[in-house]
Amino acid sequence: MAVTPTSAGRGGRVAVDWVYIQTRTLIVLGLLLVVGLCGGAWWWLAGQSLPLEKQAAQSIIRAESLEVQARAAVPGAGSLTLAREHLGEAHSAFDSQHFTRALDEARAAEAISREILDGGGLDESGVRIVQADGDVRIKRSGQFMWEPANVRSMLAMGDQIRTGAGASAQLIYFDGTVMTMRSGTLLEIRELFRDSEQRTQRVSERLAWGSLKASTNETAGIEGVHEVSTAATAVRADRASEFTVEHDREKGRSQVTALRGELKLETSDGEVAISESTRVAMTRGTIVGQSKILAPPMLKDPPDQKTFLAPRESQVHLSWMILAQAESYHLQLSPRPMFSRMEYEQESLQAAQATLPPLAPGTYYWRVTGVDAKGYPGRWSDTRKFRVLGAEFRDPDDTKPPSLEISEILVIGTNAIISGRAEAGALMWIGGERVDLDESGAFTWVIKLHKDGENRIVFQAQDAAGNETTRVGYAFVDVF
């Protein structure tokens, strides 16, 4: 058994990944390896003639196997989250019988996991498109024609990529950066450089207009720089960071926000450092404003990946924790994980809750940000998703709630270690946060207790048919 503590999650929660390696698991992996070596050609040939549904199902199985291997090999890889997102999208699309999309999403997840297993990088210096949602086009260096972008398309120095109205794209770089381009953005790849002997690497891009979000990594022993420039400014990250850059070419206005880590900003007045959670506004290269941004709201209900049954539950109620410094809230609901198209949006919510209009069956993503007294939005919350399931996708004979047993709540200081078992394959939440179950349904999870005395803990399990089981437990703390 290997135990790997991860960073504190929402609300001080601490997630613990438990990796169980059993004899039968080793046997299965061995068999998969033999099949992969001996049957690779057969997979390729057979895949060309298989019905689309079977191709999607097989691709999802392969992607899941590779994701498990990648998670075990490099548990801290930043792109693992992206692989899981694609896998989740593949499952949702398959359940909705959108097999072409399911196949594309599974292949994207498979590609990311293979990159992790191959050493965490792409080619010596490359950029790969891992998601293209809507009208996304690329123009190769020295060419004049724009061509449609495809998942897994590679970009090189001098290439350009643009997103149309309501479109978005996600790129992964050889240096581990994950870049999300929002609607109406044009980006040019200026420099992709890696020197293995000197252990240095550099990435440089030019944002002609639009907005993007970058999440950069830091590799031990390698000196790296990732730079995004506009017409009059340049922002550089030489350590792990997360930031956004927005540029309005017509008005000459730019805005850089450091969400995580510290950045260096080059302006017409010289170089300045931007600390974490800081927004800087510029006009034609001159800083005209600087402010701290609000923390992200903590989401409450519904728990992540919950299923609602239409038509009875097609009107969903959302809630989140009150943010003391927020004057109002901005809520977004989208059928797309990168929020390139909105299903519902409210920009001036006064309460930390909202009831959505009736929704058609499908998968939806939602997030919230606080807005301060000056009208500036803060950091977006984590994204949660839920499904509204139509009657045609449910088993009408399955009305039995899933099993859910809590075997132990062990309090150590201000933490509680919780063990139990739910129905295998069910979705499980503790206090509204998703919990990983092993193949038998067993789980062990660590949560942070927030007050002295008695702490009430709600446990929920939901099966594929939407049946739910709720349990309530209590943990007593006397060290606050």
Image (spheres, rainbow, N blue to C red):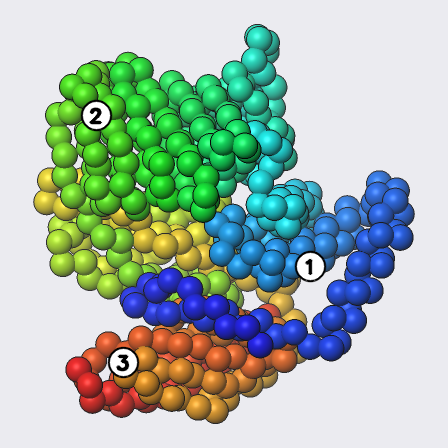
* Residue 209 drawn at (x, y percent): 36, 21
Distance between mark 2 and mark 1 Cα atoms: 47 Å
Distance between mark 3 and mark 1 Cα atoms: 36 Å
Callout 2 crowding tier (Cα within 10 Å): few <14, some 14–19, many ≥20: few
* Residue 272 drawn at (x, y percent): 19, 29
- In the depicted structure, whether residue 99 falls above or below residue 247: below
Q: Nearer the viewer, mark 3 or mark 2?
A: 2
181 on left or right of 319: right
Q: Which residue is mark 2?
A: 271
The disc, 3 or 2, on the residue closer to the chain's N-terminal end is 2
Callout 1: helix, strand or loop? helix
Q: Which residue is mark 1?
A: 65
Callout 3: helix, strand or loop? loop
**Closer to the camera, 348 or 259?**
259
457 on left or right of 269: right
**Closer to the camera, 123 or 378?**
123
Mark 2 and 1 residues: CB-CB less than 8 Å, in contact? no
- In the depicted structure, whether residue 355 falls above or below residue 162: below
* Quadrant holding the N terminus: bottom right
Q: On residue 414, which mark appears?
A: 3
| Residue 39 appearing in the image | yes
**Closer to the camera, 28 or 434?**
28
* Residue 436 drawn at (x, y percent): 52, 71
Q: On residue 161, which mark appears?
A: none
Q: Nearer the viewer, mark 2 or mark 1?
A: 2
State the residue at coordinates (62%, 67%). Answer: 394
Distance between mark 3 and mark 2 Cα atoms: 44 Å
State the residue at coordinates (61%, 28%). Answer: 154
Amino acid type, mark 3: Thr
* Residue 15 drawn at (x, y percent): 42, 69
State the residue at coordinates (40%, 31%). Answer: 226
